[in-house]
Image (cartoon, rainbow, N blue to C red):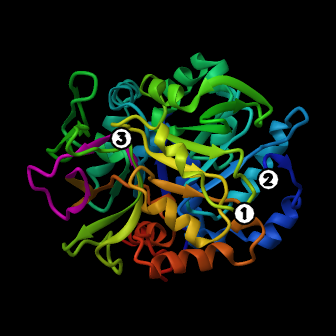
Amino acid sequence: MSKKQVVVIDYGMGNLWSVASAIRFLGAEALITTDTKEISAAKFLILPGVGSFRRAMEIIRQKSIDQAILQSLSQTDVKLLGICLGMQLLGSASSEDGNTQGLGLVPNEVHKFTNTADTRLKIPHVGFSEVKHDANTKLFSGIPSESCFYFVHSYFMALTPTIKGIATCHHGTEFVAAFEQGQVSGTQFHPEKSQSMGLNLLKNFLES
Amino acid sequence: MLSRNFRLQKVGDIDWLEKNYGFSNVGFSIDELIVLDVSRNPRNREEFSEVLKTLTNDCFAPIAAGGGINSVADATKLLRSGADKIVVNSALHSNKQLISELAQEFGRQCIVASVDCKQIEDNFYIATNNGSNLTALTLTNFLEQCSNLAIGEICINSIDRDGTGNGFQIELLDCLPELFEIPVIICGGVGNFSHLAEGLKDARVDAVATANLLNFMGDGLGSARSQLVSLGIDLPIFNLH
């Protein structure tokens, strides 16, 4: 059997190197590409990224990567995983720098953490934090609830409206740590930087 | 490696590091890894990037790297060699424009500010260029200005304690403003796990860093971590198979 091929979407933002190296470690092939033909032909798609939501969406639309993702997802056996900013981009909009529309694959919005004298919140939220899940998702198969994953972000995806296969994390407020809704899934944390737990999750994605 | 009040100490080359560390294993004892090029001669970026690549291969933990970052190109090179975050030190003071450019390019969460502090009477002063250049800027003043800097974390190191194994200089934390939003890493002086515990129990600290337990203490990190967990300190457990 030939190796599974994972397309890692390159829109010029974020550390694709470490995502690709985790995929290769798990025995699959990683193709880092910006080519819409390769994206629309993918079986496994990863949308990584760190940085500005607005800038990311500008590039994604300009390069027609949004269309390529939708085209790929029209095949029902195709799976998409958004990581960090990549997960947020799957949401409907972000309040960063005004308001920017996302890919809208889930209806949730993205907001900035706010620091008050009461919450004394550190921003960005950085480090390993517990992730709670009770749903029977493929992503978290064999991974106990309250396992720790590595986060680094200043914006978060809101829990409402309720979407499927939610895992949550707490940093001043509860937010979406991960979700799995049919073909589309996302993690706010970086599985490629979360040691064995993260590798297990990526392995689950490849086997989904 | 910088050690014993910032005198340079050689512990070994990359082969030695690989043989003695096995980062893919040590990975389970740490949350994150910081790799610094502390060369005193003109730095060889090509060589450091290759070392970083070898070091971080199959290490699936967050990695911050730095040492003499002078341009976006320097940072890009490290980020393409396995780093997730860039550590900046001297440029925080000599090249503020670079900090904005780095933040614009990679996001502020990608930038770890590192400050080396030296105590003179009752004040802590910041030193740059591997600690060789003592500035007139106090840590207190620097931290007050930090909200204007696009940085994601700050690592506060004590030159006086670094490499001594006598414990953190906790007084450094008294320089922090009341509402400080940026995550704080304290560094310099760890000799055993109880020093790490002292740092982690302080509400002003978000993370503790040590080189000593990693470089000189056999399974220093692994045993320190399990002792911290047995003290009830909330650390992630990684070794699920």
Q: Nearer the viewer, residue A70 or A189?
A: A189
Q: Is residue B71 visible?
A: no
The tag earlier along the polypeptide, 2 or 1, is 2
Respond whether the residues carrying marks 1 and 3 are from the same subunit: no
* Mark in the foreground, 2 or 3: 2
At a point 13% along the width and 56% down the height, the residue shown is A163
- The subunit letter for the residue under badge 3 reads A
Do callouts 2 and 1 mark residues in contact (Cβ within 8 Å)? yes
What residue is shown with label 2? B3
At a point 33% along the width and 27% down the height, the residue shown is A54
Based on the picture, tell me whether residue A160 belongs to the magenta stretch: yes
What residue is shown with label 1? B212
Circle 2: element type: strand
At a point 46% along the width and 82% down the height, the residue shown is B230
- The subunit letter for the residue under badge 1 reads B
Q: Quadrant of residue B26?
A: bottom right
Q: Which mark is residue A64?
A: none
What residue is shown with label 3? A123
Which amino acid type is shown beneath numbered disc 3? Ile
Q: Nearer the viewer, residue A46 or B142?
A: B142
Q: Is residue B90 visible?
A: yes
- The subunit letter for the residue under badge 2 reads B
- Quote the CA–CA distance across marks 2 and 1: 8 Å
Q: Residues within 10 Å of mark 2 (few under 14, many from 20)?
A: some
Q: Where are the magenta residues, as a range?
A: A152-173
- Quote the CA–CA distance across marks 2 and 3: 31 Å
